[in-house]
Amino acid sequence: MFPGATDEREGTDAAAQSDRDGGANFVVVGAPLDATTTFQPGTRFGPRRIRSFAEPFDDYDHRTDRHFSELGVVDHGDVRAWDDVDAYLEYLTSTLREAVWNDAVPLLLGGEHTVSLAGVRAVEPEVFVCLDAHLDLYDAYDGNPLSHAAVTRRILEDVASVEDVIVLGARTGSEAEWERAAADDVTVVPPEDVGEWTPGDRLADREVYLSVDIDAADPGYAPGTGTTEPFGLEPRELRDVVRTVAPHAGGFDVVEVNDRDDGQAAALAAKLVREFVYSHADG
């Protein structure tokens, strides 16, 4: 269970109180998919590690003067992954959509980045904002249109509600991906400009989904990810983007955490989940 959340599966007194008060405000769902990782696998361990490395964080947030445990966060547990990625994404979408229909914000813990497609399908945003080292705009990678390297392309072209994609921190991509990124419906903000980025009025009165691929961070800060890419973002830059976008976002995920470091990536991911919750509640 994510620390500070109530466990949906156990029917605790706190969860029952949340139901009496009108239901959860946020629902944590783990998605340990590890089917298309292209270099270092291990994202199947991501949800477990994110929850584990959130343990030492204080419940109280001085900036917002709020306690995480009082913000209506419920942990649904993991949706166990299986080999049929298409079928898995459909099932995961239905789980997340239930949270949306109950007026809660889904908090998805990956798992490879492909699971973001389920999150976006459930929320049906107009704007997809993504922190990522990679463009993920392949039409298919190694012949697979559901590869984690094609997830932003799938979101952009297969989810009817999505009008705009904003990729923050991207620093690599194939020639074909950069050509697709040059279209009017994609904005790419390079790492050196993320610190000064603001959305202006682009998110105002629009449904937004925020995704954090942990490899957006420089691998010196988050080495526990599948495809590390140097010259990335500092943790405070990721934090500031999350704080900025969270009040507008109806869904959030953090993905691509694996077990190949001493917890740096998982700790950063867990902290960003908490920053999202505090900032959304405060917004």
Image: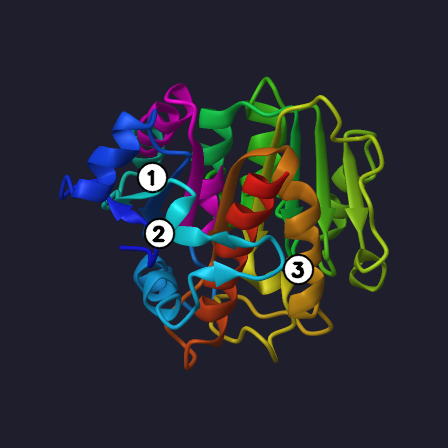
| Residue 11, picture quadrant | top left
Residue 71 on image: x %, y %: 43, 43
* Residue at the image position 37 percent from the left and 22 percent from the top: 102
Residue 216 on image: x %, y %: 63, 61
* Residue at the image position 57 percent from the left and 45 percent from the top: 211
- Of label 3 and label 2, which has the lower sequence position? 2
Task: Name the residue carrying label 3.
Answer: 238
Residue 193 on image: x %, y %: 85, 58
- Write down the region rendered in magenta: 92-116
Distance from the alpha carbon under mark 1 to that under mark 2: 7 Å
Residue 25 on the magenta span: no
- Of label 1 and label 2, which has the lower sequence position? 2
Task: Bin the neighbour count of mark 1 within 10 Å (Cα to Cα): few under 14, some 14-19, many 20 and up.
Answer: some
* Residue at the image position 48 percent from the left and 41 percent from the top: 116
Q: Which mark is residue 26?
A: none
Under mark 1, the amino acid is: Val
Under mark 3, the amino acid is: Leu
**What SS does tag 1 mark?**
helix
